[in-house]
Image (cartoon, grey):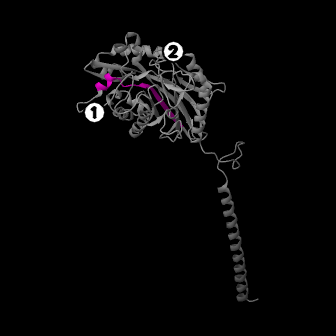
């Protein structure tokens, strides 16, 4: 073979070899692509046995902290109405809440017992309350989210007043629990917090003892149609109440509620300790699917406690939060009723696991409050004073000269709640 023929043969061999190598490269590249794709599809987290790539991917649980607050009786006696009336005939109650609204607005959910009606003019105080609509505006401005209407004064203006009260509160921006405009509506309200957790509020008031199965509120018998619009219970049928609470809680859960709060209007007026009915109802309620209990009506602060159920659930209970604002005090009722000047902002703190939909931690405390009233009978000034670290520098107490009374109220509140600053 001559040189040229040999060269041609070598070139042909290299050409065949190069083509073969190219095919091998393409094949290897394809295999690598398949392997990389398969690896990418595998989980990046190990399973519960610690074997990499063989477990189920678990996202980190979403945990949020929540603060739920409630206050007791908000009443508007005639002296208060006169004090809040402006020169043009309108009313402004905003100054009543100027020092406490910071605590109210800091909560994820804030509730209050509206122990009056918005039945329209003529406005009147005790015994048949009907307050100006501006009070509802002030409650919304103070930061309240839910108005509780289940109390013994809810029908002071009859069925018409009951329905108008719901309308006024809702138009002011508050949700309502304890009464409804139609018997087909739920017996609860659900408030969705900014953190995406839904809190249900269920509220019930006691009935006046009666015979024949009729319903009486504050001594007045009401018809069946009106009775169907309110949440009320008889002390003679606690089991029936528990059935209603359990049913409302279950329906609220099915409507998406994550947290269930219960409010009771119960107890004996001017008593500083919970009675056996209150304790029995609280213990039975704690065994239901509820998370906390608030209450008022005695017009005095009463003890608070954390009930631990048989299955280990902890349920905060405030037996009576006292008056948040009213004209009930030593000057109007006598020195033996001075405790009616004292209330509190009841607070429950929760850690909630949104992923697992359960409470993982709960605690409670209370900010004692005192209603300062100064001026003369021609024009009083009413202000709710939080008995906190700013009490010494509170501008209202400086004007009224009532710092010593406020300090005495704090000591009394701590004794009534069974706390020393907080639960």
Residue 1 horizontal side relative to residue 361, left or right? right
Counting from the top left corner in percent of width and height, residue 69 is at 47, 29
The magenta segment is 64-83
Q: Please say whether residue 377 is visible from this viewpoint.
A: yes
In the displayed structure, 266 sits above or below 61; it is above
Q: Report the disc number at residue 259.
A: none
Counting from the top left corner in percent of width and height, residue 271 is at 48, 14
Counting from the top left corner in percent of width and height, residue 308 is at 61, 23
Query: Which residue is at 66% across, 51% downward?
Result: 43
For label 2, the residue is 273
In the displayed structure, 86 sits above or below 170; it is above
Q: SS of the residue at dot 2?
A: loop
Label 1 environment density (alpha carbons within 10 Å; few <14, some 14–19, many ≥20):
few
Query: Which residue is at 54% across, 24% downward?
Result: 317
Q: Earlier in the sequence, mark 1 or mark 2?
A: 1
Counting from the top left corner in percent of width and height, residue 209 is at 53, 21
In the displayed structure, 65 sits above or below 370; it is below
Label 2 environment density (alpha carbons within 10 Å; few <14, some 14–19, many ≥20):
some
Quarter of the image with the N terminus in it: bottom right
In the displayed structure, 119 sits above or below 40; it is above
Report the front residue among 135 and 231. 231
Q: Are marks 1 and 2 in contact (CB under 8 Å)?
A: no
Determine the image quadrant of residue 24.
Answer: bottom right
Report the front residue among 269 and 195. 269
Report the front residue among 63 and 18. 63
Q: CA distance from mark 1 to mark 2?
A: 40 Å
For label 1, the residue is 90
């Amino acid at each position: 073979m001559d040189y040229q023929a040999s060269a041609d043969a070598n070139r042909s061999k290299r050409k065949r070899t190069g083509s073969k190598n190219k095919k091998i490269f393409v094949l290897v590249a394809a295999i690598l692509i398949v392997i990389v794709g398969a690896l990418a599809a595998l989980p990046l987290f190990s399973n519960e046995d610690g074997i990499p790539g063989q477990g189920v991917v678990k996202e980190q649980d979403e945990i949020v902290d929540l603060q739920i607050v409630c206050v007791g009786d908000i009443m508007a006696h005639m002296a208060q109405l006169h004090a809040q009336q402006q020169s043009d005939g309108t009313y402004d109650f905003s100054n009543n809440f100027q020092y406490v609204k910071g605590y109210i607005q800091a909560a994820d959910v804030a509730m209050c017992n509206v122990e009056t009606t918005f039945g329209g003019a003529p406005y009147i105080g005790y015994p048949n309350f009907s307050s100006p609509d501006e009070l509802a505006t002030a409650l919304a401005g103070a930061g309240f989210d839910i108005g509780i209407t289940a109390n013994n004064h809810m029908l002071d203006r009859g069925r018409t007043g009951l329905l108008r009260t719901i309308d006024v509160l809702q138009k002011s921006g508050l949700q309502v629990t304890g009464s409804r405009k139609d018997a087909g509506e739920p017996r609860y309200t659900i408030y969705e917090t900014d953190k995406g957790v839904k809190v249900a509020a269920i509220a019930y008031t006691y009935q006046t003892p009666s015979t024949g199965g009729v319903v009486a509120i504050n001594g007045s018998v009401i018809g069946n149609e009106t009775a169907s619009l309110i949440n009320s219970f008889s002390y003679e049928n606690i089991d029936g109440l528990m059935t209603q609470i359990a049913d409302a809680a279950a329906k609220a859960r099915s409507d998406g509620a994550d947290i269930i709060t219960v409010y009771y209007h119960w107890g004996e007026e001017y008593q500083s300790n919970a009675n056996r009915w209150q304790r029995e109802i609280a213990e039975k309620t704690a065994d239901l699917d509820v998370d906390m209990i608030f209450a008022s009506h005695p017009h005095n602060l009463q003890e608070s406690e954390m009930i631990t159920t048989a299955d280990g659930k902890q349920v905060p209970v405030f037996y009576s939060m006292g008056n948040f604002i009213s004209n009930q005090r030593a000057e109007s009722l006598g020195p033996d009723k001075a405790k009616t000047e004292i209330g509190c902002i009841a607070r429950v703190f929760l850690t909630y696991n949104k992923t697992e939909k359960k409470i993982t931690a709960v605690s409670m405390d209370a900010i004692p409050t005192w209603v300062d009233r100064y001026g003369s009978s021609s024009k009083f000034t009413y202000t709710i004073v939080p008995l906190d670290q700013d009490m010494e520098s509170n501008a209202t107490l400086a004007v009224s000269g009532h710092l010593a009374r406020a300090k005495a109220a704090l000591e009394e509140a701590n004794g009534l709640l069974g706390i020393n600053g907080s639960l």
